Structures are given as C-alpha cells and as structure tokens.
Amino acid sequence: MARLDSRDALAGALITGTGAFFAIYAVSNYQLGTIQRMGTGMFPLGVGLVLAILGLLVMIPAFFRSGHLPAVDVRAPLAVLLSIAVFALLVSPFGLVPAIFGVTIVSSFGEKKVNLKSLIPLCICLSGLAYVVFRLALNLPMNMFAWPF
C-alpha cells in the first residue's frame, strides 16, 4: 500500500484548485471594496478562500494515511450523458412521454444488472408524474405525444 490516500489527496487538490480559481478571478475582475462597503468581488473572494481552505483540510490528512484510488467505472456517467442526449433528441419530435421513457431506459444501463420488471413500472410512473406536473399542475403547453410522420 502506498503511504498516501490518493483519493482524498486528489479530491482535496481539486477543491483547493476550484476555490483558488474563484478567489483569483474575483480579485482580478471585480471591485472588492472595503469591509464596511463591500464591492461585487468580496463575496466570491470569500467563498473561494473558504473553499480553498476546506480543500486543504481534506488534502493534508491524506498524506499521513494509506489508501488507493478506486477503480473507475465509466458505465454510470456514460449512461447519464447518453440519456440526456436521448431526451434532447426525442422530446421535440415525439413528445415528453416517449422522451421520459427513453431517458429512463438508457439511464438504467448505468447499473450492472438491469431489472426489466421494475424498469417498465418506473417508466410509466415517471411519465404519469410528468403529465400531472407539467400539464395539469403547471398547465404548460407541452406535447405529451407528438408524431413526426
């Protein structure tokens, strides 16, 4: 085993880098003002500094314990990205209900074992919920079903 917890060290470095980026961006692009008359850059600077400090608090203890990086499984993020693309491609020509069916089916492949017995009722419930929320409750003029033919 390594003498470094790589997972926490990497996470802390990413958090610290993000906080430092926001703090530097705020200082270089916005007016800071004073403590009594704060400018537009004071809040992003403060949030960036707090984020950078919290990242250091995550990263520093990682150098004193052992650990390793877990194996990366790209199946779930890829399924989520593909499901967003499926929704974007299906919602306009076919309507909201078929797009929700497509999103649910494609995103379910992020799991290692897809259970069809629970997938079909989930598609039906999500589509019904979308109908209730968007058509009945919000009264939005969305096509639930559209036929491009």
Image (cartoon, rainbow, N blue to C red):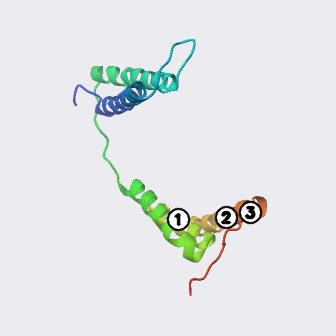
Across and down, in percent, residue 116 comes to 53, 69
Residue topped by disc 2: 125
* Residue type (three-letter) at the residue carrying disc 3: Val
Across and down, in percent, residue 4 comes to 25, 27
* Residue 32 sits above or below residue 1 on the image: above
Residue neighbourhood size for the residue with mark 1, other residues' Cα within 10 Å, grouped as few (<14), some (14–19), many (≥20): many
Residue at 50% across, 66% down: 88
Secondary structure beneath dot 1 equals helix
108 or 46, nearer to the observer = 46
Residue at 56% across, 66% down: 119
* Residue type (three-letter) at the residue carrying disc 1: Val
Residue at 57% across, 12% down: 36
Q: Specify which label sits upstream in the sequence, 2 or 3.
A: 2
Q: Which mark is residue 132?
A: 3
Secondary structure beneath dot 3 equals helix
Q: Quadrant of residue 13?
A: top left
Q: Quadrant of residue 135?
A: bottom right
Residue topped by disc 1: 103
- Residue 111 appears anywhere in the view: no
Apparent side of residue 146 relative to residue 12 in the rendered image (left or right): right
The Cα atoms of the two marked residues, 2 and 3, are separated by: 10 Å
Across and down, in percent, residue 118 comes to 58, 65
Across and down, in percent, residue 72 comes to 32, 48
* Residue type (three-letter) at the residue carrying disc 2: Cys
* Residue 48 sits above or below residue 71 on the image: above
